[in-house]
Amino acid sequence: MTPEVQGERSVGDLLSALVQDTGLLVRQELKLARTEIAEKAKAFATNAGLMALGGALALAGMLALLAAAIAALATALPVWTAALIVGVLGLAVGYVLIHRGLTALKRIDPTPERTIDSLKTDATWVKEQVR
């Protein structure tokens, strides 16, 4: 009997199907990679935007508070001493806030882990198909 009658496919048909399936697989993997990277980029942009907005508002509020603190301390101390004390405290608080934001950004892993795992699985599948 011929292979078509027995329900078997020729080597050429199998290789053709493998090429088509591999092409489809590559396109799907690229789509997954784009989606995963877009998700991580959106999280990064959101956190960076929140940091920028928070920083701008904190700066405006801090300037007003610093002026008030300097004015209050200037009643008991020379103005330059009051400004120095308030300035050092402002720098310390600013450092802590910047450090917290950078730590949060560093926790975002840009590596597309799902895509890498899927590619490894796909490579194994293709090797099995070739055998």
Image: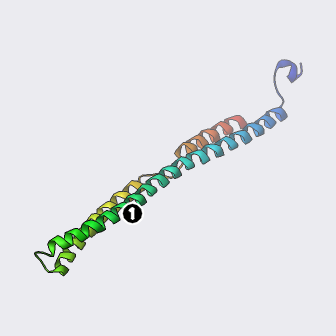
User: Residue at (66%, 41%) from the top-left corner?
Assistant: 28
In percent of width and height, residue 40 lies at 51, 49
- Position of residue 100 relative to residue 29, above or below, is below
In percent of width and height, residue 22 lies at 72, 40
Asked if residue 125 lies left or right of residue 100, the reply is right
Residue 131 in sight in this render:
no
Q: Amino acid at mark 1?
A: Ala
Q: Residue lying farthest right?
A: 2
Residue 119 location, quadrant? top right
Count the marks. Answer: 1
The residue nearer to you, when weighing 63 against 102, is 63
The residue nearer to you, when weighing 26 against 126, is 26
Residue 77 in sight in this render:
yes
User: Residue at (41%, 58%) from the top-left corner?
Assistant: 53
Q: Quadrant of the C terminus?
A: top right
User: Residue at (41%, 52%) from the top-left corner?
Assistant: 107
Asked if residue 80 lies left or right of residue 54, the reply is left
Asked if residue 74 lies left or right of residue 5, the reply is left
The residue nearer to you, when weighing 31 against 5, is 31
Residue linked to disc 1: 56
Residue 23 location, quadrant? top right
- Position of residue 124 relative to residue 81, above or below, is above
Label 1 CA crowd tier, 10 Å (few <14, some 14–19, many 20+) = few
In the structure shown, which secondary structural element does the residue marked by tag 1 occupy? helix
